[in-house]
Image: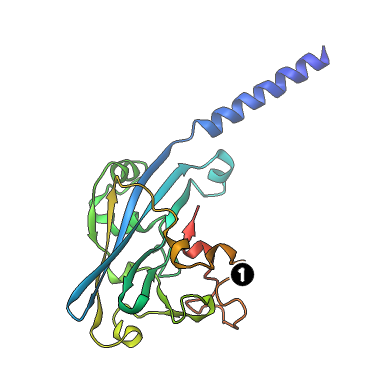
Amino acid sequence: MIRTILLVVVVFIGVSLGYCYFGLAQYTWHQKMTLEVEVDGQLYTGASVVKVTVQESEPLRKQLGYPLHFGAKGEAAYVELPDRRYLFALLGGGPPDSGPETNALNIFKEQLPKDNPERLVVLSKSHLKTEIPHSHLPLLVTFMDLTDPTTVKVVDPDNLAATFGEGVSLKRLTLEITDEPVTEGKIEQVLGWWNNLTVPIGGNVDRKYGEPLYGIGKWSFVRR
């Protein structure tokens, strides 16, 4: 009898937990970031598509003050310039809320309802597109030697010429909600060392907390 009661209790708890977890609302969209760079009057572009998932948190996380869980899957956008120089727009590392999980919600803020879940529903069904404001630009980097991750260098969006030479300037970065598939495999083709990276980039270089490159690693280029 006791075993039967315990079994009923276990089943009830399992069903209740299953309802709590599998009945959670989820919203997804694909967002495309495009870089446009001018070199001596010629335009060079590169883009990447990231999938963003926003899911209603389970009851415990809600009680802790985290009503939503954000996730992203995809790769950093980059553009190839002459002489095999590359400019990368990282998945994070820039100003607060410039990462892929929340940047669309912030950039399109004025075009969306103020409250959840309405703004998530509208954004996921939209095809919004705009130029990314300077305040939300992701961290831009390049590599002085593409085969050596420790040669990573931060690029000033207002002065690409300081890194790439005269005649090179950032025209703009754009973000749009799209139906295009998530970008996969492009970063590994360019950065052959990416898959073998086990420490933050420049991990053998002494970087101080708060520096732009502090903690930048594999996840800054690819999210899976």
Compared with 44, 110 (above or below) is: above
In the figure, is residue 25 to the left or right of 157? right
Q: Residue furthest top?
A: 1
Name the image quarter holding the N terminus. top right
Above or below, 185 relative to 92: above
Residue drawn at x 82%, y 16% is: 2
Q: Give the number of marks.
A: 1
For disc 1, the marked residue is: 199
The picture places residue 54, in percent across and down from the top left corner, at 43, 45
Residue closer to the observer: 172 or 2: 172
Q: Where's residue 23, x and y in %?
A: 49, 30
Q: Secondary structure at mark 1?
A: loop
Q: Could you tell me residue 223's position as x and y percent?
A: 49, 56
152 or 63, which lies in front?
152
Q: Residue at x 28, y 43 (%)?
A: 122
Residue 52 locus on image (x, y percent) = 41, 49
Q: Is residue 59 left or right of residue 25?
A: right
- Compared across the picture, whether 146 is left or right of 115 comes to right
Q: State the image quarter where residue 153 is shown.
A: bottom left
Q: Amino acid at mark 1?
A: Val
Toward the left, the furthest residue is: 41
Look at the image and name its color scheme: rainbow
Residue appearing at x 34%, y 44% in the figure: 120
Q: Residues within 10 Å of mark 1 (few under 14, many from 20)?
A: few
